[in-house]
Image: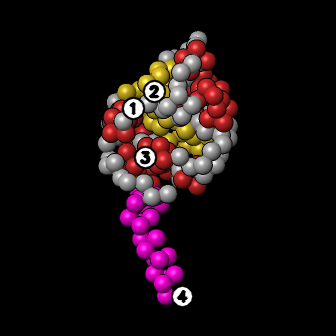
């Protein structure tokens, strides 16, 4: 991936986690929709993405709110995400989504399932990645109560995302590949 840098925007002033997922009802377990109520035990969730119709009904009765914002333009999405305390990545099975990398570039700490490329994308100093949902719930709860710590993790997340997934690195790799192909 080569993701354009939206810039450091992290505020983290809202005690909630941003979740970006497309078609969470139709895709269900693939996108971790079934886990959202468990995560809402620890922190309010703000869900963004296309095709969120029916998600409120699917996740009704949680201890803390799950607010569904739906799809919005990228600039507004980034601004909204950056106000949340952390980014929750509940995805079980899909390619590495740009929203995870964008959240890191915004300066958000990450809590996510240790699936797909998330294990490689999120270093330990940038957040929490685990296959144990209870550990992730605890991490969300800790971040909700420790805004300074969340900010520190988010700064490391941004640093890692820019180094590995930044557009300059991506373009340099392509330039190098093209030069090699021309030379051969």
* Residue at numbered disc 2: 70
Callout 1: SS: loop
Q: Position of residue 82 (x, y in %)?
A: 36, 37
Pair 2/3: label in front: 2
* Residue at numbered disc 1: 72
* Residue at numbered disc 4: 184
Identify the mark at residue 102; answer none if there is no mark: 3
Kindly tell me whether residue 171 is visible in this rendering: yes
Callout 2: SS: strand
Callout 3: SS: helix
Q: Earlier in the sequence, mark 2 or mark 4?
A: 2
Q: Residues within 10 Å of mark 3 (few under 14, many from 20)?
A: many
Q: Are marks 2 and 1 in contact (CB under 8 Å)?
A: yes
Q: Residues within 10 Å of mark 4 (few under 14, many from 20)?
A: few
Kindly tell me whether residue 147 is visible in this rendering: no
Q: Is residue 68 left or right of residue 25?
A: left
Pair 2/4: label in front: 4
């Amino acid at each position: 991936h080569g993701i354009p840098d939206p810039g450091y925007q992290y505020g983290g002033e809202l005690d909630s986690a941003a979740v970006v997922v497309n078609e969470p009802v139709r895709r269900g377990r693939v996108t971790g929709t079934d886990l959202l109520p468990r995560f809402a035990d620890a922190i309010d969730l703000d869900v963004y993405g296309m095709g969120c119709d029916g998600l409120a009904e699917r996740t009704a009765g949680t201890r803390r709110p799950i607010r569904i914002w739906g799809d919005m333009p990228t600039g507004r999405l980034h601004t909204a995400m950056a106000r949340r305390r952390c980014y929750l990545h509940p995805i079980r099975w899909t390619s590495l989504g740009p929203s995870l990398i964008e959240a890191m570039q915004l300066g958000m700490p990450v809590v996510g399932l240790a699936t797909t490329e998330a294990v490689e994308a999120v270093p330990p100093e940038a957040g929490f990645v685990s296959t144990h949902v209870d550990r992730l719930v605890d991490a969300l709860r800790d971040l909700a109560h420790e805004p300074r710590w969340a900010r520190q993790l988010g700064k490391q997340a941004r640093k890692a995302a820019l180094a590995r997934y930044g557009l300059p690195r991506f373009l340099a790799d392509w330039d190098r590949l093209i030069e090699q192909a021309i030379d051969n």
